[in-house]
Amino acid sequence: MTIGIPKEIEKNETRVPIIPATAKRLTDLGAQVVIESGLGVACGYSDTLYKEAGAEVARRRELLASSDMILRLGKPPVDEIDLLKQGSIHISRLDPFREQATVSALASRGVATISMDMIPRVTRAQKVDSLSSQANLAGYVGVILAAERLTRVFPMMVTPAGTLSPARVFVIGAGVAGLQAIATAHRLGARVEAFDTRPVVEEQVQSLGAKFLKIDLGETGQTKDGYAKQLTADQLAKQQEIMARHCAASDVVIAAAQVFGRKAPILITGEMLRKMTPGSVVVDMAMESGGNVEGSVPDEEIEIGGVRVVGYTNLAGRVPIHASQMYSANIGGLVELFWDKEAKQFILDEDDEILRGCLLTKDGNVWNERVKEVYAA
């Protein structure tokens, strides 16, 4: 089976989908690995390193047309879908709830499509969960960006010139990214407070050294996959009212609240920003799904009422070496999980709970029931 890995061509993408070590794991399985020249340049991996791992180098169009399986980070450009080999398998992050045209085009081409951002959150799938691995790094980066821009230090310092009080950091959303943000801010010496609509995460927040803010919103909770449920308008208004006071008392706010498959809720309004101390920093980590902060701009830093609002997307891409290492391990692990060593090919086991969750298209149709429901609505 031939596995092709093209270069990422999205603007500002610094990560690579496969590093040489993973390429070696795939060739050891018996796969013929073919890369596009320059695949790993952004992370310092030369073509020579991939060749030493057993990979071959080919032109992009040739690679796309001849490969039985394509491994990518992001979605394929629409004008490349017709180049893909019919009956091939395409694995990447696809954001299927917002990319219906792309998913439908892959189905029409007869490509079996697996979305890395639909991996079910079950114990057996932890090593292939790229959403978690990239969110983990994003949480770290979000706090580092805030620390660089804040006009005061994070830790308490006792000096001959006086005592400097620690920065106050408020983290909204205690998913994977939020928990890493809490841990990073705490390690930097900040006084950290966090809120999440899921009471079940209180113990995790406290274990990382932060105080958990309790807001009685009535029935909330999480989905079977561990994601926060969408709030009602009344619940959201009550949450904003109480959070406004905590934002005003904070030097840094990290907004990392997202609802899987939906637009991120606006949690921090312009009015709330104007009540914060000038010089404070807000990092909107939900920009890729619309943003949590009113007025934030994708991939820009702006000031609202004297508060610096940071709205960068692809935060994990700011630490591309480790982000690539982790994503490569995720996608390589997925291939290994369903690889038949005797037949030397990837087996689409539709009865497996992992593939049932992330297999989007097959045999010319959109296959995933959850995605079909959204498209039909």
Image (cartoon, rainbow, N blue to C red):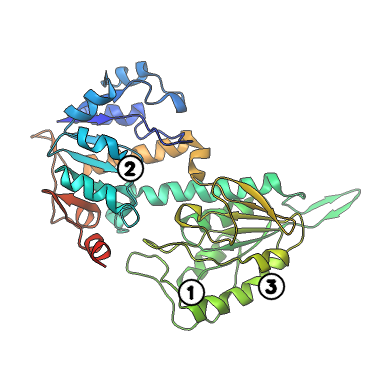
Earlier along the polypeptide chain: callout 3 or callout 2? 2
Q: Is residue 278 left or right of residue 240?
A: right
Q: Secondary structure at mark 1?
A: helix
Q: How many marks?
A: 3
Q: Are marks 2 and 1 in contact (CB under 8 Å)?
A: no
For the residue marked with disc 3, what is the amino acid? Arg
The CA distance from mark 3 to mark 1 is: 20 Å
Please rate how many residues cluster around mark 3, counting C-alpha atoms within 10 Å: few if below 14, some from 14 to 19, many from 20. Answer: few
Q: Is residue 80 above or below residue 93?
A: above
For the residue marked with disc 2, what is the amino acid? Lys
Outermost residue to the right: 161
Please rate how many residues cluster around mark 2, counting C-alpha atoms within 10 Å: few if below 14, some from 14 to 19, many from 20. Answer: many
Q: Which residue is mark 3?
A: 245
Asked which quadrant contains residue 48, the reply is top left
Q: Is residue 122 above or below residue 327?
A: below
Outermost residue to the bottom: 218
Residue 130 appears in the rendering? yes
Q: Are marks 3 and 2 in contact (CB under 8 Å)?
A: no
- Which quarter shows the N terminus? top left
Residue 113 appears in the rendering? no
Earlier along the polypeptide chain: callout 2 or callout 1? 2
Q: Which residue is mark 2?
A: 75
Q: Is residue 16 above or below residue 152?
A: above
What mark, if any, has residue 199 been given in the picture? 1
Could you tell me residue 342's position as x and y percent? 8, 34
The CA distance from mark 2 to mark 1 is: 35 Å
- Which circle, 3 or 2, is nearer the viewer? 2
Could you tell me residue 3's position as x and y percent? 21, 31
